Amino acid sequence: MPRSVNSVASRARRKKVMKQAKGYFGRRKNVWTVAKNAVEKAMLYAYRDRKTKKRNFRSLWITRINAGARLHGMSYSQFMGKVKSNGIELNRKVLADLAMNHPDAFKAIVERVK
């Protein structure tokens, strides 16, 4: 009896990976083994960097809040401590946006917590 191989599924699996490798440079886009490795690595980077992106944005927000707070004579840690103790429930993303795009609103918050 001949060996049964599910070539339909194998082909579909390879086709899926080759579709993901579309747009890559050189052999990465059309040679199966190279494309498979490239896509695997890309998926790994994508997974890792979804986590890193959150860290980077939080860091950016903190930097912007710090810059805004220092314009009004406070450090970031003093400002955030007073924001929490006064019960202002604005997160860092919103505070950073106010500090950057709406300085008057940010100044009002600083005056309220002082």
Image (cartoon, rainbow, N blue to C red):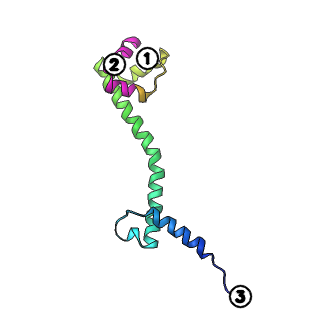
84 in magenta: no
Q: Could you tell me the amino acid type at mark 3?
A: Met
Q: Residues within 10 Å of mark 3 (few under 14, many from 20)?
A: few
Tag shown at residue 26: none
Magenta residues?
95-114
Relative to residue 2, is residue 99 drawn left or right? left
Which circle's residue, 3 or 1, is located before the other in the chain?
3
Closer to the observer: label 3 or label 1?
Answer: 3
Q: Give the left or right position of residue 23, taking residue 37 as reference.
A: left
Q: Residues within 10 Å of mark 2 (few under 14, many from 20)?
A: some
- Kindly identify which numbered label has been placed on residue 74: 2
- Magenta segment, prevailing SS (helix, strand or loop): helix
Q: Secondary structure at mark 2?
A: loop
**Few, some or many C-alpha atoms within 10 Å of disc 1 (few <14, some 14-19, many ≥20)?**
some
Callout 2 amino acid: Met
* Residue 51, percent from left and from top: 47, 45
- Name the quadrant of the C terminus: top left
The answer to whether residue 73 is left or right of residue 50 is left
- What is the three-letter code of the residue carrying label 1? Lys
Residue 73 quadrant: top left
Q: Secondary structure at mark 1?
A: helix
Return the x and y of residue 58 as percentages of the image width and height.
42, 35
- Mark 3: which secondary structure? loop
For label 1, the residue is: 82
Q: Which residue is mark 3?
A: 1
